[in-house]
Amino acid sequence: MKISFLINNIYGIGGTNRTVINLAEALAVRHEVEIVSVFRRATATKFEISPRITVRALVDLRPGSADRDAAGSDEPSEVVPRQEEFYAQYSRFTDGRIIRDLEKTTADVVVGTRPSLNLFVAAHTRDGALRVAQEHMTHLAIPPAVRAEMARVYPRLDAITTVTEADARSFMENTPIPGIPVVGIPNSVPEPAVAPSDGTRRVVVSAGRMHQIKRYDLLIRAFSTLAEEFPDWQLRIYGDGGEAGKLRSLVTDLGLTGRALLMGGFSPIESEWAKGSIAAVTSSAESFGMTLVEAMRCGLPVVSTDCPVGPREILRDGEDGFLVPNGEVEGIAWGLRRLMADEPLRRTMGAAALRNAARYDPAAVADRYLELFEDAARRRAAAERGYRAPAAGRRTGADQLTVEPAALGAAVVDVTADDAGWLRFSADGPAEGRRRWQFVLRHKPVDGVRRPDLPLRTSRKDLDNGGTHYSAVLTPSALDELGDGRWQVTMGAPKTSNVHMKAGVRDTRALIDARARLIARPPSGPIGWNLPYAQPNGRLMLRTVLREEHAECTGVDVGDGAVTLRGVLCGGRRIEAGALFIVSRRGRHRQSFSVPVQVTGRQAFRAEAPLRRVVDHRLERWEDWDWWLQPDPFDRRKVRVCHVLEDFPDVKGAYVYPSVPLVGDEPSAYAVVHPARPVWVRPYCSASGAMAMNVVDR
């Protein structure tokens, strides 16, 4: 059987793309599968797709493509209703491309994936193919005018699917299509490549686009009511979107800097779920709830709002999580408190979540779709004389569930870190042939001085699918050669150019424990740290830290006209009586001020920044003042205060501190500004991890 999925843009990122790929991969084990993307705006897909699936685009909108200015591209679509969300993307030109492809398709089954495309599938797919519409949106969220067009055109379909049973009922009640079955089949989520959470790390995780419908503001407020009761817990929210700025302001307003972190986008996300012990979903509406299933598949109990449609079909309230009232901070806080306060309950519910989420495995969901296709074929055969049902799928063994990557550059590298500084790399690539590929770390200098490449001893294992599994280990002792810097993770072979590898799963949860141990007992020798991360283009990088001595920031408190630093000193020197915290103005007009350091424990220190002196001596409207520690008042050697020893790379984006408004004690040397005018001082972590503060006259 040949199955074709018609999707808006498979080269982008989003829930529909992810679930369509999951289903396509499962079906491709025994069937021929293609994904037809109406648009192509990027060279490669954001999500990995195996070579056994054909991916092609109908309209190429990359720079330089002739399709960008094709005749008819400035004329409105005659198929897509004006009220449809993506109406502006379609035109008379795109109509023609889609219709011609559907009329000549060789697929036995064509599956549309949103209302606009389902209208094309219903009206224009060749008569010999089954026509199936997937509805990923909550039905009543579809504009009435679009639903009216669906009611007119959908009778030519053979089946309709929704992602929940409740939405299937809503579809049949509000837009009945006589004679066409509407079936609720959930989205699928594959088994994660990481080990499930053990429920011990005090982290609440949430993930999804930064959109008002996700109601992250409720989650942050709920967490703030628990912050004092559970001081060692952290909230991490993953995702990008327009609400990020408002949410950052809310975090600082509630005094949750360092406690509630906005982590930005992250893919693959399963490693981040596994770092947590509780998942939180606070949406006001969900068409399904992919994040619930993702979290459950990583062994996390979920606290979810009982919003319309999705969560109540996924969660078993009181067994693998809690359903709490929609839109209520108090209910969310109640669910979180139950789990935060009870580790045995977290473990029990997490185990139940892991078991119950198995029903969303792609193979199980694919079987339901195959039953749907077979039922549609029987009905078509009974109604149409001469219709020939598609052939059954090919028989394959379990050893062919995966296929050999087409090229090494298409493979991804998974990395696992442990709390002792070891990194383990693994990748599945094509058959080697005569080449002997191995992992090679290549230095990315910031000062123009490049260190030599570091080849890693690489093990190879033949796979049943004809490919090769590569693995290598980076030991802490390798830091002597790597030093302090950034490295590309590549694969190289004799007489070939190195291939900069794509980032797969980066399981760095053990670094959370390593940081906690380091802060509690700072080492008396050199400090080392290995952190794998992905560049924006998806390439795998390694951040290495090797320092004889290092001052790690463990907290910054902002309030009441003061900024207080907390940190620990690692290395051979001790913090002596009279140690100093120094702030130094960056740039041409260098100046420094110092204050005594308070020793608070084993190599731990605390100091209050001399804000008044900085404000009184400012020379420009915007200044940066760097932070230093001088451990010994009789030894002028200073140590830069940094925040780098984390399990994630973007400390600058995650830790956003509020500003302190100050009026100087004396007239400023910067005479343009009246001395009574407030100046704003804001601490921050730079992209390199160094701590500093802005002094800004607004």
Image (spheres, grey):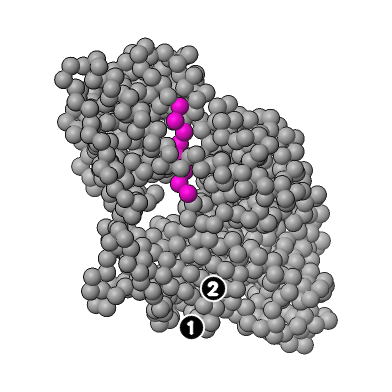
> In this rendering, which labeled residue sits more in front, label 2 or label 1?
2
In this rendering, position of residue 324 left or right of residue 130:
right
The correct choice, above or below, for 166 with respect to 444 in the image is above
Horizontal and vertical percent position of residue 172: 45, 16
Horizontal and vertical percent position of residue 28: 31, 44
Pointer 2: residues within 10 angstroms few (<14), some, or many (20+)?
some
Depth check, front residue: 585 or 152: 152
Q: Which residue is mark 1?
A: 481
Q: Are marks 2 and 1 in contact (CB under 8 Å)?
A: no
Could you tell me which residue is drawn at 40 percent across and 42 percent down? Answer: 363
Horizontal and vertical percent position of residue 659: 70, 53
Q: Of helix, strand and loop, which one carries label 2?
A: loop
Could you tell me which residue is drawn at 64 percent across and 60 percent down? Answer: 684
Could you tell me which residue is drawn at 27 percent across and 78 percent down? Answer: 494
The correct choice, above or below, for 684 with respect to 46 in the image is below
Magenta residues, dominant SS class: loop
Horizontal and vertical percent position of residue 143: 45, 20
Depth check, front residue: 226 or 665: 226
Q: Is residue 692 visible?
A: no
Quadrant showing the N terminus: top left
The quarter holding residue 379 reads: top left
Q: Which residue is mark 2?
A: 422
Pointer 1: residues within 10 angstroms few (<14), some, or many (20+)?
few
The quarter holding residue 66 reads: top left
**Disc number for residue 527:** none
Please count the marks in the image.
2
Q: Label 1 is placed on what type of residue?
A: Glu
Magenta residues, as a range? 184-191
Disc with the residue nearer the chain's start (2 vs 1): 2
* Residue 568 belongs to the span the image colors magenta: no
